[in-house]
Image: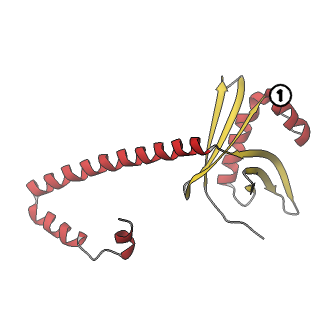
Amino acid sequence: GGGDMKTFRIRLLILGENEKPESLRIELSCEDDLFFHYFHTIDGTGFDHLRGRQKLRIEFKSFPGVIINTLNKCIKEPRTYMSVLNLQNGTGRLDFVQNMEYKFVELLSLRFTKSPDEFVRQQVSHRFKVLKEEKEVLKAKLDSMNKLIRLRNPSLLLQMGKMLQKPKSNETQAAR
């Protein structure tokens, strides 16, 4: 049967110069699941095998650009270009597919591996730290705004306070 539609965050990292890459690493993560993290690495030799198997007509140096263009097409033209991720036992296959009117044509297929737990923990920890810092910055802005309103328009602050004191839903209470 059909799978779930999910939005993935894709990071493309190039080792070496853009015009002459030594290797390429693609990371897949998901906002819905902080512990979801897969990667694909490939160098020139690996690309030669991939190119032969999948009958690609490009050089390794153009490969990052082709991936970026293909991903952008999936975003801008989702009815025509799709990416399909199949996961099984810690490995995955990301297929880029073009929908012709009469059939689906596979453009490119990449194998992914589940990232090691320690790496995933570091990623989650980093994202948590960033969110915590962003929250502190927003809190400071809110506090300074409250002080400004208290000085300039105290009655507005009272009205805002009443608006914000509506009963909280169970969801926010349960999250605490």
User: Residue 78 versus residue 49: which sits nearer the camera?
Assistant: 49
Three-letter code, disc 1: Thr
Decide if residue 147 is on the left or right side of residue 76: left
Residue at 66% x, 23% y is 16
- Disc 1 crowd rating (10 Å Cα; few below 14, some 14-19, many 20+) is few
* Residue 84 appears in the picture as rendered: yes
Spot occupied by residue 144 in the image (x, y as percentages of width and height): 19, 49
Residue at 81% x, 46% y is 108
Q: Which residue is mark 1?
A: 45
User: Residue 34 versus residue 42: which sits nearer the camera?
Assistant: 34
User: Residue 106 versus residue 111: which sits nearer the camera?
Assistant: 111
Spot occupied by residue 61 in the image (x, y as percentages of width and height): 75, 28
Quadrant location, the C terminus: bottom left
Please, is residue 14 above or below residue 130 in the view?
above
* Residue 82 appears in the picture as rendered: no
Residue at 75% x, 68% y is 2
User: Residue 173 versus residue 139: which sits nearer the camera?
Assistant: 173
Q: Secondary structure at mark 1?
A: helix
Residue at 63% x, 34% y is 13
Spot occupied by residue 94 in the image (x, y as percentages of width and height): 75, 50
Please, is residue 122 above or below residue 169 in the view?
above
Spot occupied by residue 66 in the image (x, y as percentages of width and height): 74, 38
